[in-house]
Structure formats: C-alpha cells, structure tokens
Amino acid sequence: MRDLLDFAGWSKPDAEDLFATADVMAEVLRRPVKRVPALQGFTVCTAFFENSTRTRTSFELAARRMSADVVSFAAGTSSLAKGESLRDTVETLVAMGVDLIVVRHSASGAAHLVRRFAGVPVINGGDGARAHPTQALLDAYTLRAHWGELSGKRVVILGDVLHSRVARSNLELLPLLGAKVVLCGPANLLPQSLSGPNLEVSPDLDSALDGADAVMALRVQRERLEGGLGVSLPEYAARYQLNRSRLDRAGPRALLLHPGPMNRDVEISSDLAGDPRSCVLEQVHAGLAIRMAVLYHLLVGKKERAA
Ligand code: CP
C-alpha cells in the first residue's frame, strides 16, 4: 500500500491484513499507557480543506498514539485566503518535511490530485462524494467485531446515497468482504448508475429492511443538496427516517450504524441513537485502531521496503 485513496486493487486478504494490524492497535489502546514508539521520527500532516470532527481528530490521535509528530493544517486560517493554490499549499507542507498527508476536500478527485504532486503517501480523508476509505474500513471493522465474518450478511445503506462518499466506499469494501449491500432512499438520492456484485437498489424501505443484519443511516447532506431533497425535511423524515419501529422490522439483533455527524430526527430518530443496537460510538472508537493501522502500513511498511 503506497497511498489509501480508495479500494481500487484491494482484495479480501488486503483488508484482513489491515484488520489484523488494527487488532494489535486496539490492544495498545486498552493499555493504561496508550502509546507505542512505532512512528517515532515521522511527521503526519492533516490537511483538511473541509470541516471534520471524527476523521481529523482520530487521525491526529492515532499518529500521536504511535509517537509521530503531527502538523494540523487549518484551511480557514491559511494562505489559501490570499489565493494560494491547492498544489502550492501541498508542496509547501511537503517541503517542510512531512512524511504523509491526510487530505479532506469538498471536490471529488482532490485526493488523487494531491497524490500527483505530494511525493509522500496520501490518505484520502474524504473527497467530495467520491470516497472515504477509512470510514468504510472502520464500519467493516465494527461489524466484524460483532459478527466475526461479513460473508452472507445483508447491510442496508439508507438515505442520501447520491452525495455520500461513505456509501461509495462501503459499496467497494463490503461486497469484497462477502456482504450483500442494499441501497435504499428516495429515487432522486439513489443513483441508478451504481451497480456491482452483491448490490441491490431498493426505493422501498420496508422490503429493504426485511432480513437486514445491519442498517447504516446516512446523513442528509444539506450542504451538497443543490437540487433539493425533492421533498421537505419533515416529509423525508416521515418516509425514510430510521426509527425504532423501522429498525424492529429488521430484527432485534440488527445493528445500527451511522458515520456521523447525525442530523437527529432527520435521517435518524434521536432516541434510536442510544438504542442497544446502535454502534455509533463503537464506530468512532474503531476509527482510532483502523487509522493507526493505516498509518502504520503506509509509513512503517514503506520504511521496510526501502531498507
Ligand atoms: N464520519 C466523518 O467523516 O465524520 P467527520 O466529518 O466528523 O470527520
């Protein structure tokens, strides 16, 4: 693994290899002193051109847990405001000696662009509606903690699929691990172009939920909804909000996922977030071990290959 931009070229053993490293990192995180020297001497730069709470914080914490130095580039207070380009910004950061860049950007494809001129490993922390690979890895890792194996499981991804990089990355990863993915949402937020093995598209929520082993509610991305929902938010909530009675339809053992941030009482009823079936905070916790594993594979793997 040279970069992590998406799952192109990945196989099931690649994901399992990463999960095995994440298991080791999870053990580190259970220790009284949650720090190892694995990345001592490396500098990780988080370059976020779009807001984030979970992804930026957990990458920075993951790097620090492995003794790396962290540079946190804040787009809002940077020289971008003076007209500096994305390329000049990245080349400037690399010239200061950073060893790896985690990039988030509102434009689909921005992470690939950054890779072209960075000259150091790049991790996609979410680019437009295209990909968010570490989110999908932490989602799968959370499900694996409950099920052991994802093979044969039915995972419903519900809501604003059109604008969701989380959905696209899960669509690449979950079928690779043997799960069947069912996409469900309003027709105008459900791209018909998406297709693939182990993928089903269903605008009907009740039939999508029947027999689901897990339901992932997606955030309604109001900031990207140029064409509008086609319905009002209350109408959307009435037809597609994941609430207790709908999750009950999937079953008492069905798991609930949400990548966050949640719009409570829009795509998910507020009471359901605290339901025993909810894995929302488990997902956040899993993100730390997964991001430690990704940083370790990119930086230490690279060093070993160079030796
Ligand atoms: N899930 C996710 O990417 O959250 P943030 O936008 O807070 O990073």
Image (cartoon, rainbow, N blue to C red):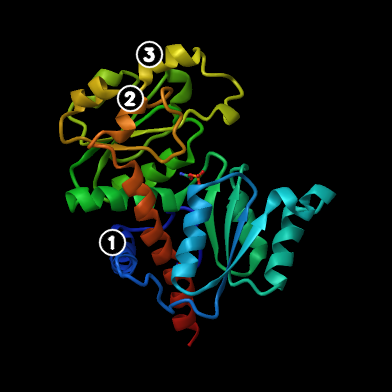
Q: Is residue 49 above or below residue 19?
A: above
Q: Name the residue under label 1.
A: 16
Badge 1: how crowded within 10 Å, few (<14), some, or many (20+)?
Answer: few
The image quarter containing residue 209 is top left
Q: Is mark 3 on a helix, strand or loop?
A: helix
From the viewer's side, name the closer residue of 6 and 248. Answer: 248
Q: Which residue is drawn at 20% across and 27% down?
A: 250
Q: In this view, does 170 lie to the left or right of 84?
A: left
**Disc 2 vs disc 1: which is toward the camera?**
2
Determine if the C-beta at disc 2 is less than 8 A from ligand 1: no
Q: In this view, does 95 lie to the left or right of 41?
A: right
Q: Name the residue under label 3.
A: 238
Task: Work out how far the residue at label 2 is from the one at label 3, CA to CA, in angstroms.
Answer: 9 Å
Identity of the amino acid at label 2?
Leu
From the viewer's side, name the closer residue of 240 and 120. Answer: 240
Q: What label does residue 242 carry, if any?
A: 2
Measured as percent of width and height from the top left, residue 163 is found at 51, 33
Identity of the amino acid at label 3?
Ala
Q: Is residue 26 above or below residue 204?
A: below
